[in-house]
Amino acid sequence: MKARLAASAALALGVALGASGCSMVTYQATTEHYDASDGVSANVGDLDLRNILVVSEDGVDGTLVLTIINNGDEKVSLDVQVDGGDTVTIPVKAGETVAFGADAVEGEEEVEPIILEGIDTKPGANLPIYFQYGSAEGVEKQVPVLDGRLPEYESLVP
């Protein structure tokens, strides 16, 4: 009787471990960061840059779409430089989140779009854009250029 009870307990333990232990050695994709949208992300010092993309119909001029999150305690000015061209400076207050190219959220004031002129990059290609502020180390990202075919980007075509 004791042998039968011990065998039943061992079998139950084996089934429990076999059914739940597979995640101990299996790769977990949820631990990997990925961009869950059409744009790319970057971090520059205390700034988190999310969903960065450019919307252009002709590949000559484009609207920069991005969200900037300032996690720092000071106001900063983010410099955005397109492939060695002109630099656009964007002020961001401490603790503020600013969305460019998105509809204003209730309670937020509407933000003027950022038009990049002379990008010379056709929709479907990537545009190198450099982001930097103050003494923080800058980063260059290959930003996708999209056209206005999708309804969410129709109103963003310059």
Image (cartoon, helix red, strand yellow):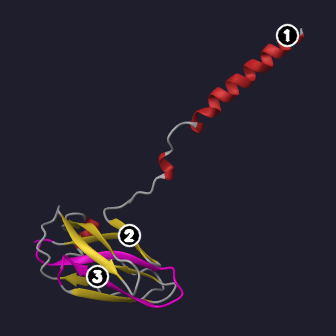
Which residue corresponds to the image point at 89% horizontal and 8% vertical from the top-left? Answer: 1
Specify the farthest residue to the right.
Answer: 1
Left or right relative to 121: residue 97: right
Q: Say what amino acid the circle numbered 3 marks.
A: Val
Q: Secondary structure at mark 3?
A: strand
Left or right relative to 63: residue 16: right
Residue of label 2: 42
Q: CA distance from mark 1 to mark 2?
A: 62 Å
Q: Which mark is residue 20?
A: none
First of labels 1, 2 by sequence position = 1
Which residue corresponds to the image point at 15% horizontal and 65% vertical from the top-left? Answer: 123
Q: Which mark is residue 80?
A: 3
Q: Say what amino acid the circle numbered 1 marks.
A: Ala
Q: Nearer the viewer, residue 56 or 138?
A: 138
Q: Which residues are magenta?
A: 57-85
Q: Secondary structure at mark 1?
A: helix
Q: Which mark is residue 3?
A: 1
As for residue 67 lying within the magenta part, the answer is: yes
Which residue corresponds to the image point at 26% horizontal and 67% vertical from the top-left? Answer: 143
As for residue 102 lying within the magenta part, the answer is: no
Residue 98, percent across and down?
A: 41, 82
Q: Callout 3: 10 Å neighbours few (<14), some, many (20+)?
A: many
Which residue corresponds to the image point at 28% horizontal and 82% vertical from the top-left? Answer: 80
Left or right relative to 42: residue 16: right
Q: Secondary structure at mark 2?
A: strand
Q: CA distance from mark 1 to mark 3?
A: 74 Å
